[in-house]
Amino acid sequence: MRRRKQSDGAIPVPGSAGLLVTRMVKVDDREELSFQDDKGASRSTWIAAALVVAIVGWMGSGYVLPSEDADTPQASDGEVEPVSVAVEQSSTQQVTLYFQAEGQAQPDRDTEIRAETSGDVAEVLVAKGADVGDGAVIARLSATRAEADLERAREELDRAQREFNNASELLERGVATVDRVSQARATLAAAKAAVTTAEEAMDSLEIKAPFAGRIETLSLDKGEFVQAGANVGRIVDNRPLTVAIQVPQQALGRIKSGQTARVSFITGEEREGTVSFVGTAASAETRTFLTEITVSNEAGAIPAGISAEIRIPTGTEDAHFVQPSTVSLSPEGRLGVKTVDDTNTVVFHPIEVVRAEIDGIWVTGLPETARIITVGQGFVREGEDVKPSVNPKKATSLAQGD
């Protein structure tokens, strides 16, 4: 379509997509549209295309024009220098093994004091906290009623004795019958039993200590009425003490009656004791065995009920003393120590900890003499060649233990 001059009635109208729409107006009032490109609108398209080409060219420049580093010759194919590690010479030593456990001190005997008969408290002879001997009188009950019962029982006994004697004489004369004599004998026996009961009631008026010990509680006051069988106090004997511990199943075979034990109480006292009992039936809840250690406490200075730590020597073992930092794990998760053999090759030895100290542990599983890697064990693997530097083991670490 040919373009008309402006004088022919052309009116420019802005359009979309960078085109100018020209409205043509004719003389005869008919309209005709024509389109033309806007050169300024296509400029951004050329700029974007140029950027894409530049980026692609830069990314491919490494292949077309390799860097100078690529022409640098690679390192020589010689042997890699072995890793340097510090080693420590170690030898086995005989160390005493211990079984350790926490326990509680218990009194040798602990029982309640009970009244054997009813009555009013006439006097209290000891106070709470007093040390008493075996059979010592703690309190006495009023004897008025008991004395009356004993007097009546004795009178009944005298009467029954006379009745029996008379019946026996009459039987000899042929006047009385055998049944009368038997009845008199039964009455006499009942009277004797009544006297015995009354005498025991008199003895029961004294509340006595069942054994020597310390009065821990006492709930008796003068004039108080107590019933027969009532609990009136508690007596404890802590000479000697008994320390009870629980031994797990895996350690039961190492504990025997008669073994010596070292007992450290929480109060600071230390005593030597003897294993006096080892249980043969495990607890259903914990699967442990009750074990008791008897500890001498002649002065009674150590109270019952406090906590204690027990160490029982269970034998000896040839072991190495190592630092915990030298212990590592194998790929399979086993605990072990890495050493260097005669050819400077790393060897991994699985170990077992047999005793722990504050500054180290005693382990088995290593050869009699070994060069233990102390520095760098985390950077080498089993079978790898290393360059060891000897670090002599300190004499103080060799003397740990007993």
Image (tube, rainbow, N blue to C red):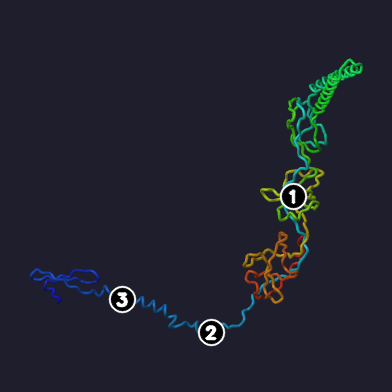
Q: Quadrant of residue 313?
A: bottom right
Kindly identify which residue carries mark 3. Answer: 46
Q: Quadrant of residue 94?
A: bottom right
Q: Quick one: 170 or 367, which is closer to the camera?
A: 170
> Where does the C terminus fall, quadrant-wise?
bottom right
Residue type, label 3: Trp
User: Disc 2, disc 1: CB below 8 Å?
Assistant: no
CA gap, disc 2 and disc 1: 78 Å
Q: Say if 56 sits above or below 309 in the image.
A: below
Q: Quadrant of the N terminus?
A: bottom left
Residue 73: which numbered mark, if any?
A: 2
Q: Is residue 33 above or below residue 358?
A: below
Q: Earlier in the sequence, mark 3 or mark 2?
A: 3
Say whether marks 1 and 3 touch (CB < 8 Å): no
Image location of residue 17, percent across then percent down: 25, 70
Which residue is label 1 attached to?
280
